[in-house]
Image (cartoon, rainbow, N blue to C red):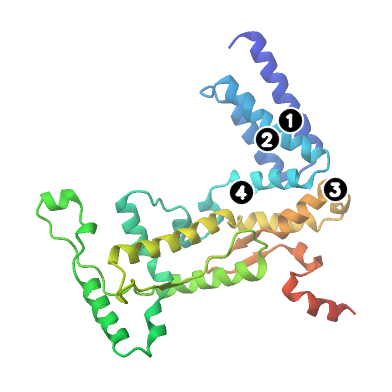
Amino acid sequence: MPPDQKQVLLEFYRSLNRKLLNLKLDAVADRRLRNWLRSQFKDTATPLHRKLQEGKRFDLILDGSLNGHYKSGVKLLRMAYYDLISFDARAPKWLSDFARAKVYSRAQKDRFFSEYSGILKITHDIHDFKSIPGLVEKYMINLQQSETKSLPSNHSITDILNGVKPAVQSSTYGSKKPLCSLFSQLRTQYKDHIDHDWALPQLNLKIPPNPAGLPLSPSVRRNLILVKLLQIKRFINEYPPMKMEDMEHLNNFVKSETFGSHPMSFAYERFTRDSFALTKNGKFKLSKIRDFSIPPPKNLFNYYVSVK
């Protein structure tokens, strides 16, 4: 790199560091963001224009935070406490395995389906038509037959060429009780505590019959289940937990005597209020900032009565 370009890059790096220093972030966020910034500018494999682009993006967030825009402050904190920390470090293994699972190839989809279809409560709409004589019985007989026969669509070309017989599909999508219980508890806590813009996916799935009143094909039923599981997966990745240690650190920070005069106090309050950590058995640990926050709308009336 020519000397003049090195000097420009160095000055830009120093400018970003000065702005970061002026924000007076908590020790954990400050350290992580400084380390990230240093790594971005020291990476010799990254082209100069890419470093400048990334630096400019970061510069805009810093400027917004310094100008009192709380949304920019929240972005900065989210970067420090979520983006720079792997999901594995922020969540119990059972949730991390689910949220980070790759579901692209046929084999990956098969594994994902086999591992997690049991967290759903699956019912069939045909039971709503019990008044029609013989309809439900005919449906259930056909359903059992279709679920117990081999499915060539689940059989790879390699296996066919090698003479390997296809596996028999399980006759039921059996509930995996430990996982089912954990995900059920997780959904309840999302509903009760987290202010989310996305629709919270249900853990139940009703499968309709085909126009003839018979079961949909096994592959269609399987795809319906996969779509539901992927909805849950996307939601969890959009609203993930933070590290337990980070939540405890932030709780101490927002309770400190000097926090009220911090220039980013509102951004910290919004960020910590909407964050949570997760124990190994799936229970939320919430920010203590909520102790002084107005409760969500469904509890607002009781709150009003209690403080009158």
Label 4's element?
Answer: helix
Q: Is residue 181 above or below residue 3?
A: below
At 62% from the left and 61% from the top, the residue drawn is 277
Q: If you read the primary sequence from the N terminus, does the residue marked by circle 1 or circle 2 appear first? A: 1
How far from the left and from the top, in percent, is residue 178?
A: 44, 73
Q: Nearer the viewer, mark 1 or mark 4?
A: 4
Mark 4 belongs to which amino acid? Tyr
Which residue position is annotated with label 2?
34
Q: Nearer the viewer, residue 259 or 236?
A: 236
Q: Is residue 70 above or below residue 292?
A: above
Q: If you read the primary sequence from the N terminus, does the residue marked by circle 2 or circle 3 appear first? A: 2
Q: Is residue 26 above or below residue 176?
A: above
Check contact, mark 1 vs mark 2: CB within 8 A: yes
Mark 1 belongs to which amino acid? Asn
Which residue position is annotated with label 4?
82
Q: Nearer the viewer, residue 130 or 103?
A: 130
Q: If you read the primary sequence from the N terminus, does the residue marked by circle 4 or circle 3 appear first? A: 4
Mark 3 belongs to which amino acid? His
Which residue position is annotated with label 3?
262
Asked whether residue 116 appears in the rendered view, the answer is: no
- In which quarter of the view is residue 47 placed? top right
Q: If you read the primary sequence from the N terminus, does the residue marked by circle 4 or circle 2 appear first? A: 2
Q: Find residue 97 and name its label.
A: none
The N terminus: image quadrant: top right
